[in-house]
Amino acid sequence: MHDPALAPFGAGSGKGATHPVQTVSWYDCVKWCNARSEKEGLTPCYYTNVAQTLVYRGGSANLSNEWVKWTANGYRLPTEAEWEKAARGGAVGMRFPWSNVQTISRAQANYCGETGYTYDLGPNGYNPLFTPGDMPYTSPVGYFKANGYGLYDMAGNVEEWCWDWYGSTYYASSPSSNPTGPTTGTYRVLRDGDWINTANNCCVANRNKIAPDSLIFDIGFRCVRGL
């Protein structure tokens, strides 16, 4: 394992040991994936050259798609397409991560209710179970029911970093199988809703974007692994 003093990470934050981490930048998340891979003796996914020989461990490098070892068995951020497939949980044509209804309520996810949306059953406002004390008002992972793939909080709680650069028209001409996003960009993709936003952000097809160095208390991440 490399010396962490050579590449300090953003510390991130979390409301409790069972809550999602938040206030982490895209760079922090990518370096964390590599660090976890190396700690567990797995092959890192992210590098700083096209030859994929220099492991990404420090700084704020805008990695390119060609610098990713997609076949590695280490940890990485999901692509935007992978995230959406995971969020749908095997359901087809549904607005949210569950297969039995096209609506959402505060009994299903941690978000800010707004019944002005016809598909939001509310009630309005933040969930009072998670609002006492200081922000952020995240909920424990596993509090709400999982989707069809057994994944929690694919709607609500925190927005999640994806690998991809954001492109507003990318999917009009992207590969039909395993797209990895535009080759360049200004913003990285965020998916999922969060505790502070309303139901429209919780739709599985909703796309957001933000600068990769952003540190905000409603943004976190989840990682995936190759086999």
Image (cartoon, rainbow, N blue to C red):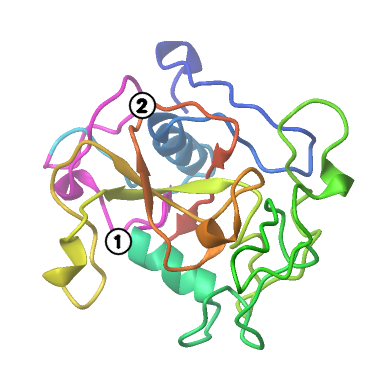
What residue appears at the point 24 percent right and 48 percent down from the top-left corner? 68
31 to 104, vertically: above or below: above
How many residues crowd mark 2 within 10 Å: few (<14), some (14–19), many (20+)?
A: many
Q: How many numbered discs sit on the rendered protein? A: 2
What residue appears at the point 51 percent right and 39 percent down from the top-left corner? 36
Can you identify the residue that label 1 sits on? 71
Is 42 part of what is drawn in magenta? no
Q: Measuring from the top left, give residue 81's x and y in whole percent.
A: 34, 66
At mark 1, the secondary structure is loop
Q: Amino acid at mark 1?
A: Thr
Per the rendered image, the range of residues in magenta is 50-79
Mark 1 or mark 2, which has the lower sequence index? 2
Give how far apart the Cα atoms at labels 1 and 2 are.
19 Å
Can you identify the residue that label 2 sits on? 57
What residue appears at the point 51 percent right and 21 percent down from the top-left corner? 10
Q: Is residue 143 visible?
A: yes
Q: Which of the 4 image quarters holds residue 79?
A: bottom left
69 to 170, vertically: above or below: above
124 to 177, vertically: above or below: above
171 to 78, vertically: above or below: below
Q: Is residue 227 visible?
A: no
Q: Which mark is residue 52?
A: none
How many residues crowd mark 1 within 10 Å: few (<14), some (14–19), many (20+)?
A: few
At mark 2, the secondary structure is loop
Q: Main secondary structure of the magenta part?
A: loop
Q: Measuring from the top left, give residue 198's x and y in whole percent.
A: 60, 53
Front-lying residue, 36 or 189 = 189
Q: Amino acid at mark 2?
A: Arg
